Image (cartoon, rainbow, N blue to C red):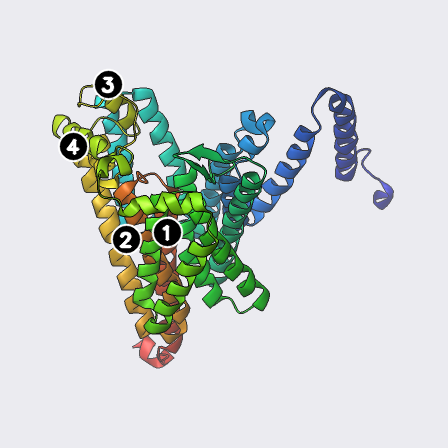
């Protein structure tokens, strides 16, 4: 009669009891909480399960959250710190997967990663001489989140399909930022400064007009690379429409720095195009067309770019703040005035200025805020990033099946040119695009190297068993 004996409570009974208990608790709690919280809780639970199973979804989800900024769109969610919690969770899952897969936890030790780690240390050291220690530590924390994002890209994007998926999601989110900004602009949500109605982002992911213009300008090369890479006609048309739309939106931000960054992108793209005469003709037609449809207020704004009667006034006081930045470099050359604390140093009056103002120059920003220590670390990062892109191109030339890599590699280079031009008149040191491009470059290089090693192993002649025995 042993077969007829059953346990009074089995595992399936426990699941039903737990489900009933949760239902009762939910029924008691729901009347007393905002409906949004249970919905978010359910979505988080589903995503937790998916991320544990597929860590790459965690990277895509983090990218979406990072650019969507749910805490700003829905202020009631701000206390949940979704971005921070999600990033930490995906990081832990990635490390655990790595431990299970390889039996050990490994960290990237390439020169780009080490240089970024050194720069983070330099940022923390700058807190010793910072004019606003709280702001410096907050800047360090934000940059650490960016480095976590960088690590997730390097650790998880290890196939061509994952890379392509990341590019599509990024393009979609940049498109959303652009569309949301334009909808707000049409509804009157623009910023009126310097005599023009300026398009601005609806969240900090888009930012002020200058940041939004730069974001769109340096994203265009990656979008165009997607147009070349993807075969689906719908995707191609969508990406082309996005790049065309962003080109117009850059103009109505009223950002002269953003326009110069876009010109830098055009010049960078010109270096890689095979049909240079066609490219010159197309750019001329584009410029004439945009200038024709552009409202008068923006044309007047951009005409000041060639007004050299008063360079400092035209550049919105940049010359004065650059002079103050040079005095900061001389005054605190080793560790600077503190990462993220430039405004406080400028407002202190110690460097001949006297009001809050950003440095408006990348080199001055690095040297003035993190000193020689930070400048050395960041320079090593940048030089090795450029070198790795060149090495990647060398691998591609020797391996025809990796021609697709050169498309994105060239896109990265053009984006870096745009970032560099923007850095001449802006302060984009902590812009995530630098470090996202670096992560994707390292991931691509590892992907190509690994595939070449596997191909070499597959084509290597087999050694006879008798020879092995000897």
Instruction: Point out the residue furthest to the left here.
Output: 330
Residue 76 on image: x %, y %: 60, 26
Indicate which disc, 4 or 3, sits on the residue closer to the N terminus. Answer: 4
Q: Residue at x 46, y 67 (%)?
A: 228
Q: Is residue 195 visible?
A: yes
**Crowd band around label 4 with a 10 angstrom C-alpha radius: few (<14), some (14–19), many (20+):** some
Indicate which disc, 4 or 1, sits on the residue closer to the N terminus. Answer: 4
Residue 208 on image: x %, y %: 43, 36
Of tags 2 and 4, which is closer to the observer? Answer: 4
Label 3, on which residue? Answer: 348
Q: Nearer the viewer, residue 452 or 287?
A: 287
Indicate which disc, 1 or 3, sits on the residue closer to the N terminus. Answer: 3
Q: Give the distance between the C-alpha atoms of the residues marked 3 and 2, in whole angstroms.
A: 36 Å
Q: Residue at x 26, y 40 (%)?
A: 362
Indicate which disc, 2 or 4, sits on the residue closer to the N terminus. Answer: 4
Residue 410 on image: x %, y %: 35, 62
Label 1, on which residue? Answer: 437
Q: Give the distance between the C-alpha atoms of the residues marked 4 and 1, in whole angstroms.
A: 29 Å
Q: Residue at x 42, y 45 (%)?
A: 298
Describe the element under mark 2 as helix, strand or loop: helix
Q: Give the distance between the C-alpha atoms of the residues marked 1 and 3, in whole angstroms.
A: 36 Å
Label 4, on which residue? Answer: 326
Indicate which disc, 1 or 2, sits on the residue closer to the N terminus. Answer: 2
**Which quarter of the image is occupied by the C terminus?**
bottom left
Residue 5 on image: x %, y %: 84, 40
Q: Give the distance between the C-alpha atoms of the residues marked 4 and 3, in whole angstroms.
A: 15 Å
Left or right of residue 126: residue 63: right
**Crowd band around label 1 with a 10 angstrom C-alpha radius: few (<14), some (14–19), many (20+):** many
């Amino acid at each position: 009669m042993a077969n007829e004996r059953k346990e009074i409570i089995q595992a399936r009974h426990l699941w039903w009891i737990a489900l009933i208990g949760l239902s009762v608790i939910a029924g008691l709690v729901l009347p007393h909480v905002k409906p949004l919280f249970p919905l978010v809780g359910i979505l988080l639970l589903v995503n937790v399960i998916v991320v544990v199973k597929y860590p790459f979804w965690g990277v895509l989800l983090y990218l979406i959250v990072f650019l969507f900024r749910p805490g700003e769109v829905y202020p009631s969610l701000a206390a949940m710190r979704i971005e921070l919690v999600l990033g930490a969770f995906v990081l832990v899952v990635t490390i655990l997967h790595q431990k299970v897969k390889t039996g050990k936890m490994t960290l990237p030790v390439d020169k780009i990663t080490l240089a970024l780690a050194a720069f983070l240390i330099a940022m923390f050291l700058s807190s010793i001489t910072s004019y606003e220690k709280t702001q410096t530590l907050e800047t360090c924390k934000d940059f650490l989140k960016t480095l976590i994002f960088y690590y997730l890209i390097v650790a998880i994007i290890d196939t061509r399909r994952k890379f392509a998926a990341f590019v599509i999601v990024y393009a979609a989110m940049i498109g959303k930022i652009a569309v949301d900004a334009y909808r707000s602009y049409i509804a009157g949500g623009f910023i009126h400064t310097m005599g023009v109605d300026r398009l601005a982002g609806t969240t900090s992911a888009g930012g002020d007009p200058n940041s939004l213009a730069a974001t769109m300008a340096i994203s265009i090369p990656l979008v165009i690379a997607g147009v070349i890479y993807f075969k689906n006609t719908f995707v191609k048309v969508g990406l082309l429409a996005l790049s065309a739309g962003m080109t117009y939106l850059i103009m109505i931000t009223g950002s002269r720095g953003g326009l110069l960054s876009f010109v830098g992108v055009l010049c960078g793209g010109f270096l890689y195009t095979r049909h240079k005469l066609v490219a010159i003709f197309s750019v001329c037609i584009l410029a004439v067309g945009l200038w024709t449809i552009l409202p008068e207020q923006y044309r007047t704004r951009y005409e000041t770019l060639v007004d050299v009667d008063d360079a400092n006034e035209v550049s919105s006081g940049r010359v004065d703040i650059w002079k103050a930045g040079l005095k900061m470099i001389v005054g605190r050359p080793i560790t600077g005035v503190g990462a993220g604390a430039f405004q406080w140093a400028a407002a202190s009056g110690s460097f001949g200025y006297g009001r809050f103002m950003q440095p408006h120059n990348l080199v001055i920003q690095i040297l003035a805020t993190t000193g020689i220590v930070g400048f050395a670390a960041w320079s090593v990062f940048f030089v090795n990033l450029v070198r790795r892109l060149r090495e990647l191109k060398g691998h591609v030339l020797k391996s025809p099946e990796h021609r697709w890599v050169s498309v994105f590699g060239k896109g990265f280079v053009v984006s870096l040119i745009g970032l560099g031009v923007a850095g001449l008149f802006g302060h984009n040191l902590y812009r995530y695009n630098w470090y996202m491009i670096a992560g994707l470059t390292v991931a691509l290089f590892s992907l190509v190297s690994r595939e070449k090693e596997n191909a070499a192993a597959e084509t290597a002649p087999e050694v006879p068993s008798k020879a092995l025995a000897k």
